[in-house]
Image: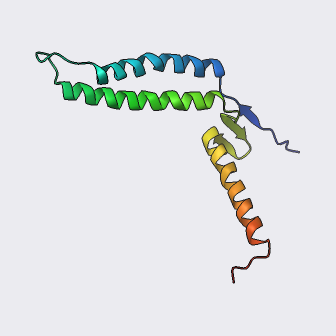
Amino acid sequence: MQTSRTLVIRYSKSKIVGLALLTLPFVALFAYAVVHRYRPDSRYPADLMRLVGVLGAIGFGSLLLYLVVKLFDRAAGLVLDAQGFIDGLVFAMSSFFDRAKAAEGASLSSGSDGV
């Protein structure tokens, strides 16, 4: 007789907080590169430094936003069961689409045939 066992691994909140705290200086550094006035005799062009600053601030800022969202997310990070591995993002999206299909099916079966 086979038993169905499922292993659920949650995200570590302390690691997420640590990563978020590590991204804060990078966001600040790249934001400073955007607003800082460069000397005309600087080694690098001011436009290049601003472009690097904008791209870095957007990249690390979006990472910081993702980490803050994941900090309050209660969904599983990884699920291992008889069918295999399911990533937390895939698991969340599949449950979202299952709910959307169920809502769509309920509206179709409510008697409105669209005529």
Residue at 74% in and 71% down: 108
Report whether 18 appears left or right of 31: right
**Residue toward you, 78 or 102:** 102
Determine whether 105 is above or below 74 in the image.
below
> Quadrant of the rendered structure where residue 87 is?
top right
Question: Which quadrant is home to the N terminus?
Answer: top right
Looking at the picture, does residue 114 appear above or below residue 29?
A: below
In the rendered image, residue 48, in percent from the top left (x then y), is placed at: 21, 28
Q: Which residue is located at x 36 percent, y 23 percent?
A: 31
* Relative vertical location of residue 105 with respect to residue 65 in this rendering, above or below: below
Q: Relative to residue 66, is residue 41 drawn left or right?
A: left
- Quadrant where the C terminus sits is bottom right
Residue 73, percent across and down? 66, 33
Which picture quadrant has residue 61? top left
Q: Residue furthest right?
A: 1
Residue drawn at (69%, 79%), measured in percent from left and top?
114
Q: How is the image coloured?
A: rainbow
Q: Is residue 75 above or below residue 109?
A: above
Q: How many marks?
A: 0
Q: Residue at x 28, y 28 (%)?
A: 52
Asked whether 12 or 69 is in front, the reply is: 69
Quadrant for residue 75, please give it.
top right
The location of residue 101, given as percent across then percent down, is 70, 61
- Measured from the top left, where is residue 70 in percent x and y? 61, 31
Residues 89 and 69: in front is: 69
View extreme (left): residue: 41
